[in-house]
Image: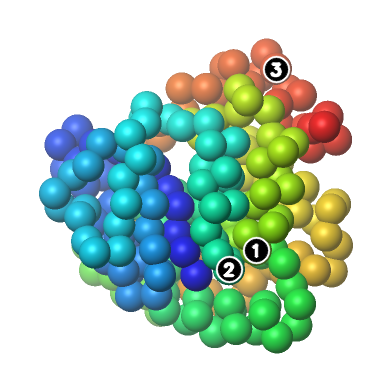
Amino acid sequence: MNAVSSFRPLAQDEEWKRNQLLAKRSWEVWARAIVLFGAEDRELVSRKTVFIPSEQYPALKNMAAMASSLPGFTAILNADIVVSQDIRFLERMMQARGKVCASSRRYHFDPNTCKWDEATLGDDRGRDIFIARQDIWRRLTRVLPEDLRIGNARWDAAFVKWFRDEFGDNFIDFTDRKIVFHPVHEGRNRPYDEMIASKPDLVDPRKWI
């Protein structure tokens, strides 16, 4: 499986730097290739990692297009999401059963202790990871609105709805496998929430053509 993400410049905030580095180290274990939208940062460099110059909040269409250029399954995920190596077993299961896309809710953990067994779902419905086969990303790229970017609270629900509506039983929710973890942290950067509120069609898959 491959990984595609964007990231906040590490020098901006020490908490985000810690969380993003922790997440990136987890991806290095299982990802065949890692594509990061943003300026190259030496602390994120690895033999697997490619940087795509980008503004801080890239268009999801561009991220999906990148995922569609990579063979096999690719995960688009948030920069601070830790994913265990059990994602490999999920990938093999999807291949064996003909599943084409997947997502999971996230388990919240304390990044100071990283006690994964104590991570909890709570009432958070956030997702932050979307996995699909190359041809599925290609199909989604064709319909995504140009103006839909990360940096809003509703894009993940829109992706889940599109996956469910388009692929039915060939979409799987793997929350029960407990392999996706989100660090508890302060604050949220969502500069496009107001724009989305004024243009709700951007996050309504029924309006995507």
Circle 1 is placed at which residue position?
Answer: 133
Q: Is residue 197 above or below residue 81?
A: above
Circle 2 is placed at which residue position?
Answer: 72
Q: Would residue 106 be visible to someone looking at this image?
A: no
C-alpha gap between disc 2 and disc 1: 6 Å
Q: Quadrant of the C terminus?
A: top right
Helix, strand or loop at label 3? It is loop
The type of residue carrying mark 1 is Arg
The type of residue carrying mark 2 is Gly
State left or right for residue 107 relative to residue 185: right
Q: Quadrant of residue 200?
A: top right
The type of residue carrying mark 3 is Lys
Q: Identify which residue is drawn at 57% across, 17% down.
A: 194
Residue 84 x %, y %: 41, 75
Q: Identify which residue is drawn at 70% across, 17% down.
A: 199
C-alpha gap between disc 1 and disc 3: 29 Å
Circle 3 packing at 10 Å, graded few (<14), some (14-19), many (20+), is few
Pair 1/3: label in front: 1
Q: Quadrant of residue 116?
A: bottom left
Q: Identify which residue is drawn at 65% across, 63% down.
A: 133
The colouring scheme, among rainbow, by chain, secondary structure or one colour, is rainbow
C-alpha gap between disc 3 and disc 2: 33 Å
Circle 3 is placed at which residue position?
Answer: 199
Is there a contact, CB below 8 Å, between mark 1 and mark 3? no
Helix, strand or loop at label 1? It is strand
Residue 125 x %, y %: 61, 51
Q: Which one is in front, 131 or 13?
A: 131
